[in-house]
Amino acid sequence: MQNSHKALWDNCLLLIRQNVTEQQYNTWFAPIVFESFSEADHTLLVQVPSPYVYEYLEQYYVGLLSKVLTRCFGTSVRLTYRIVTDKAHKLTQDVEGEQPVDIDTPQPKARINQSPTALDAAPSDVSPQLDIHKTFQTFIEGDSNKLPRTVGLSIAEHPGKSTFNPFFVFGPSGCGKTHLINAIGVRCKELYPQKRVLYVSARLFQVQYTDAVRHNTTNDFINFYQTIDVLIVDDIQEWASSPKTLDTFFYIFDHLFRLGKQIILASDRPPVDLDGVKDRLLTRFSCGLIAELEKPNVQLCVDILHAKCRRDGLKIPADVIELIAQTANGSVRDLEGVVNSLMAYSIVYNSSVDMRLAERVIKRAVKVDNHPLTVDDILEKVCGHYGVAQQHVFSKSRKRDYVLVRQVSMYLAQKYTKMPASRIGQLIGGRDHSTVLHSCTTIEQRLKVDQAFKAEISSIENSFKLKL
């Protein structure tokens, strides 16, 4: 009997697919899993992957769900959701959905054919535009992000009621800013589903504003944003050369701030370095809390990779994880890109995930512009400058020329790579970390007293300057 009920649910999905876009279907309906149907109380139980998906379905698609359930299962079908609250520990919670609406009850067409857009949404139903995969559960804590993460969680639990308003997060590309501010929004929406939470990129905000000016609807644009309870804006440095956008945002900011609404901003630089932004807005950006997200260090990169392996069921050897963490230049995006490429290569070529494959993938997956110099790069330049073959540098020979090249290479490797001394030593002839430290000290002392040698080292550095 359950199989026939499953078939009825499949028919529901077919009807839904005909009434929404492909992207809406894949995002909100494809992840739903049929659990069971009770004939006794006419209750359909389905599983959804997160509380946010449940809330979104109930907020925007309850009318559509009611219609298709009535058509396929008959009248008075009660819909219950089994929500996955903790995927790692397989924890779920059952929640009853809203009562189904009779098929003859008029429903707004926009609810069936499309999700609401920002400017025509009613005050109670605005799409948050959040990435539901970027949560605090997947945002791994480390020394470089402990303060911003802790503050962000506090804001999510008490939006607009702390001294952290506005919350200004800055840091280099790939450090996790977008993940953090999304996590704040997702958590806030889970705790306060009635609040109007909105994530928007600075670029999209500017496009919306430009369209509003073109269509003479600027007041509607401003009025909409002034109804938001938690406004999250990403990459605001892109407004630096757009004074009219900044002026408009000033009025929105001022209104929200006076009403005690939460404002969260992210940028690749601190407020003081935002050229082109007027002082009246800079002072407002700085009146809450400014928190820096630093690039994750090697240990945090390792922790992130281990968490990703557990979450996605991947099996990557510890030494490969260490290599990826050391090579990704402190970028979470690079970490994920390397892992995805590594798994793809492994499947396509039916090869095991090992150091050899990792080195091949890293060389292709990480952009040279964002990738630090490798030890191989440095060895090539130093050996070329002194006319010494690498095999002599790797040898046990104590010949003066070979020792000099070896020491200079170790010094530059420690200066321009994020590798520990032990790793540098392994890559340069299998030396231990004490040899690397001694070499660095020797070169540093000589640079202080030998101007000709200092010029020589500068010449080598200039030869690979474009790679830094």
Image: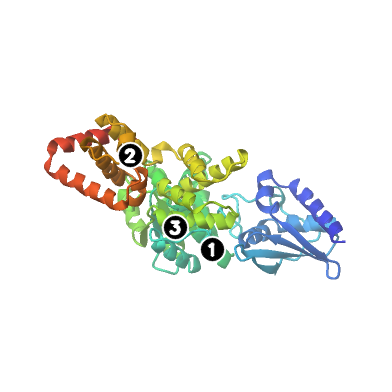
Describe residue 316's horizontal placement relative to residue 26 as left or right.
left
Describe residue 76's horizontal placement relative to residue 56 as left or right.
right
- The tag earlier along the polypeptide, 2 or 1, is 1
Describe residue 373's horizontal placement relative to residue 404 as left or right.
right
- Give the residue number, with chain letter if any, for mark 2: 394
- Give the residue number, with chain letter if any, for mark 1: 187
Query: Which of labels 3 and 2 is toward the front?
Result: 2
Label 1: element kind:
helix
Say the numbered circle drawn on residue 264: 3
Front-most of 343 and 272? 343
Residue 413 placement: quadrant: top left
Cα distance between the residues tagged 2 and 1: 53 Å
Q: Estimate the x, y position of residue 296 in percent, counting from the top left.
A: 40, 54
Say the numbered circle drawn on residue 369: none
- The tag earlier along the polypeptide, 3 or 1, is 1
Query: Which of labels 2 and 1 is toward the front?
Result: 2
Label 3: element kind:
strand
Q: Residue drawn at (28%, 34%), measured in percent from left and top? A: 382
Q: Residue drawn at (17%, 38%), measured in percent from left and top? A: 454
Front-most of 332 and 273? 332
**Circle 3 residues within 10 Å: few <14, some 14–19, many ≥20:** many
**Circle 1 residues within 10 Å: few <14, some 14–19, many ≥20:** many
- The tag earlier along the polypeptide, 3 or 2, is 3
For residue 17, above or below residue 54: above
Q: Estimate the x, y position of residue 429 in percent, counting from the top left.
A: 34, 42
Describe residue 276's horizontal placement relative to residue 108 as left or right.
left
**Labels 3 & 2 near each other (Cβ < 8 A):** no
For residue 406, above or below residue 14: above
Query: Which of labels 3 and 1 is toward the front?
Result: 1
| Residue type beneath disc 1 | Arg
Residue 51 placement: quadrant: bottom right
Cα distance between the residues tagged 3 and 2: 53 Å
